[in-house]
Image: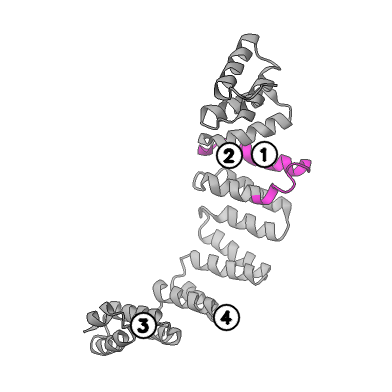
């Protein structure tokens, strides 16, 4: 009968049938989960939460039901009850650091930064190899405007193999892009992080070498400027500025024959662009 109601999308009737089924077989966890889902589809949040509470009374606190309640309370802007769900999970699963991370993020949103730091340090103690830990601390110190501690954790994150290139560059740009062209200290920190990244598998990304090239050229380091431009081109970042930078940097130390070779390749790739 319940399948008929589901096929007709008569979810309220289906939930009534499922309540009867649960009374007959209360030991089947899947039935409780189906009932909670039915109330969710009906938009009956109160009944959904009550069902999840009844489920936990019978089967104990678990990630599935508590996280559902957490999200429901968040949608209702009831942060106190949302937090209670996560605290219950920390008690039920004391070795799981992810729940402390959620609590820390909640405290960050509340601007209770001291409590957030306390929770982040607990995560660090429980899971020192957490791949996002350094970026998490970096975000904390970004909000607190502690530039030295921010750089410290970004420097550690830049060397991580388990954080992808896009994530690293995304947060580095977010932190430094506004002042990187105008403030020397900001540029130096930004560039140091890029150089740190080239020691990892991030070195396979041509975009990294393209950014490094701009830094080397700004520092008048023409040997590394030429090397980084060539590396970026070899890895697939074929743009005219890289050809120009390569030619300019190489002109400070390379042979005339090599400069002709570089010029020919630039002209071949960009025949309509005049070389300086």
Which span of residues is magenta-colored? 174-202
Judge whether residue 89 is colored magenta: no
Q: CA distance from mark 2 to mark 4?
A: 41 Å
Q: Which residue is mark 3?
A: 55
Percent position of residue 183, x then y: 78, 43
Mark 2 closeness class: few <14, some 14–19, many ≥20 residues within 10 Å: many
- 247 sits left or right of 13 in the view: right
Helix, strand or loop at label 3? It is: helix
Q: CA distance from mark 3 to mark 4?
A: 21 Å
Q: How many marks?
A: 4
Q: CA distance from mark 1 to mark 3?
A: 53 Å
Q: Nearer the viewer, residue 101 or 65?
A: 65
Mark number displayed over residue 203:
none
Q: Which residue is mark 2?
A: 197
Helix, strand or loop at label 2? It is: helix
Helix, strand or loop at label 4? It is: helix
Q: Which residue is mark 1?
A: 192
Lower sequence index among marks 3 and 4: 3
Could you tell me which residue is drawn at 41 percent across and 76 percent down? Answer: 65
Q: CA distance from mark 1 to mark 2?
A: 9 Å
Lower sequence index among marks 2 and 4: 4
Q: Nearer the viewer, residue 220 or 90?
A: 220
Mark 3 closeness class: few <14, some 14–19, many ≥20 residues within 10 Å: many
Quarter of image, res 250:
top right
Mark number displayed over residue 80:
4
């Amino acid at each position: 009968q319940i399948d008929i109601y589901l096929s007709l999308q008569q979810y309220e009737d289906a939930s009534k049938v499922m309540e009867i089924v649960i009374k007959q077989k209360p030991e089947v966890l899947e039935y409780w989960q189906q009932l909670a889902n039915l109330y969710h589809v009906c938009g009956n949040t109160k009944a959904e939460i009550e069902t999840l509470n009844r489920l936990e009374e019978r089967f104990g606190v678990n990630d599935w039901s508590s996280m559902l309640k957490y999200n429901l309370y968040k949608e209702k802007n009831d942060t106190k009850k949302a937090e209670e769900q996560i605290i219950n999970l920390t008690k039920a699963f004391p070795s799981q650091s992810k729940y402390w991370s959620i609590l820390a993020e909640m405290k960050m949103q509340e601007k209770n930064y001291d409590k957030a730091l306390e929770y982040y340090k607990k995560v660090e103690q429980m899971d020192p190899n957490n791949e996002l830990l350094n970026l998490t601390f970096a975000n904390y110190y970004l909000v607190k405007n502690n530039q030295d501690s921010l750089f410290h954790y970004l420097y550690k994150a830049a060397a991580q193999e388990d954080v992808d290139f896009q994530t690293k560059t995304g947060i580095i740009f977010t932190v430094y892009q506004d002042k990187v062209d105008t403030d020397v200290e900001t540029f130096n920190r930004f560039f140091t992080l890029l150089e740190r990244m080239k020691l990892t598998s991030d070195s396979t990304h041509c975009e990294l070498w393209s950014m490094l090239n701009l830094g080397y050229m700004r520092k008048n380091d023409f040997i590394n400027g030429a090397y980084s431009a060539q590396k970026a081109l070899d890895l697939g970042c074929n743009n005219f500025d890289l050809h120009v930078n390569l030619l300019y940097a190489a002109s400070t130390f390379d042979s005339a024959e090599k400069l002709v070779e570089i010029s020919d390749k630039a002209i071949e790739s960009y025949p309509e662009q005049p070389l300086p």
